[in-house]
Image (spheres, rainbow, N blue to C red):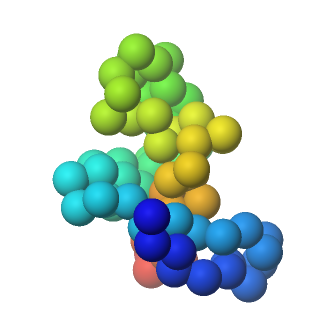
Amino acid sequence: MKVEGITPSSGTRIIIPPQEIRQEIETTAKYVARHGRDFENKIIVKEKNNPIFSFINKDDPYRAYYDQKVNDVFFLY
């Protein structure tokens, strides 16, 4: 796995996911940034058994990448 670095705000290492997962994360992050964490909670409930959305779980190795993307998009609006 490739490590991008350390996020300044949390000190958490960000692991870059494979391209196919990265695309799903970035699309989901855009929706969550626009529609809020309530929207994220709906995804968690609806997709809890879908491995494509495992990055939403707090203990997933790609969670920090997802959180960073949500923040990046949020601050654009």
| Residue at image coords 43%, 29% | 43
Q: Nearer the viewer, residue 2 or 63?
A: 2
Is 16 located above or below residue 41 in the figure? below
Q: Looking at the image, which residue sits at the far right?
A: 10
Q: Nearer the viewer, residue 60 or 36?
A: 60
Q: Nearer the viewer, residue 64 or 34?
A: 64
Picture quadrant where residue 46 is located: top left
| Residue at image coords 55%, 29% | 41
Picture quadrant where residue 26 is located: bottom left
Is 60 located above or below residue 26 in the figure? above
Residue 65 drawn at (x, y percent): 51, 63
Residue 59 drawn at (x, y percent): 66, 39
| Residue at image coords 32%, 34% | 52
* Apparent side of residue 59 relative to residue 62 in the rendered image (left or right): right
Residue 71 drawn at (x, y percent): 56, 69
Is 70 located above or below residue 32 in the figure? below
Q: Is residue 23 visible?
A: no
Q: In this figure, what is the number of numbered marks? A: 0
* Apparent side of residue 75 relative to residue 18 in the rendered image (left or right): right
Q: Looking at the image, which residue sits at the far front?
A: 1
| Residue at image coords 45%, 64% | 1
Q: Is residue 63 visible?
A: yes
Residue 77 drawn at (x, y percent): 45, 75
